[in-house]
Amino acid sequence: MNRWKLALCLGLSIFLLSSFAFAAPIQTNINASKIPAGKIPSITRAVGPDLTVISAKVDSAPIVGTTSVAIPLNITIKNKGTINVTDDFNVGAEGSATDGNVYGFEFIVVGETTHERGGVSVSSLAAGAEKTYQGTLTLVPQPLGTEMNAGSKYKITAMVDYNLDPDSGYYMWGINETNEANNQLVINYPLTIAPATAPAKIVVVKR
């Protein structure tokens, strides 16, 4: 009789342990897709503002002075998002001579306020709306105080809602957008055009 009781107790213990094992939470891949602390999940970022540079062009030949180069620059931005931007943000550019020693990020538009982070200050932009700014990007010799080599070829990066402070990653700034990867557009002056490909020669073989 004691043997039967012992066997019954062992069987009951095994059953209970098995039950607890199956009742334990099943691990899924949820942890693998957790959003890092401080980040907004992408599902909530599908709706929001999205500032982008849709075009940038040099309006006329750069003006080369004795101490600086002034580049007439036209920048068009758009809010491609679904929500209006109501906070201030900036629009501007940085540029450099690829065959000289000038560089600069001072973009000024007559009649517009300069933003604290540089460039032009924009107070708002409705969803789907565009704005164009015709201003001047000034380049100066680098390092400062050296003799200027103005060059003749320039690389220009037009930007919206930007921050050139190398420590900007350590504090909050700017507009929280659905896409933070489309806030700049790089152009070259003069515009580089690939040479036309010559048509293949047709060789006729007489037989």
Image (tube, rainbow, N blue to C red):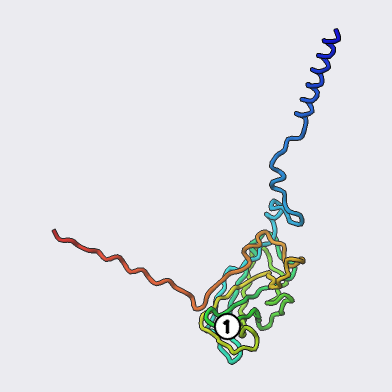
The quadrant holding residue 126 is bottom right
Is 12 placed above or below 191 here? above
- Residue 12 left/right relative to 107: right
The quadrant holding residue 11 is top right
Along the viewing direction, whichever of 149 and 90 lies nearer the viewer? 149
Horizontal and vertical percent position of residue 30 = 71, 43
Instruction: Quadrant for the N terminus, please.
Output: top right
Along the viewing direction, whichever of 118 and 49 lies nearer the viewer? 118
Residue drawn at 81 percent across, 21 percent down: 13
Horizontal and vertical percent position of residue 195 = 39, 72
Residue occupied by mark 1: 101
Residue closest to the far front = 3
Along the viewing direction, whichever of 71 and 203 lies nearer the viewer? 203
Q: Amino acid at mark 1?
A: Asn
Horizontal and vertical percent position of residue 179 = 65, 60
Horizontal and vertical percent position of residue 3 = 83, 10
What is the count of numbered marks?
1
- Residue 69 left/right relative to 35: left
The quadrant holding residue 57 is bottom right
Residue drawn at 79 percent across, 25 percent down: 17
Residue drawn at 51 percent across, 83 percent down: 152
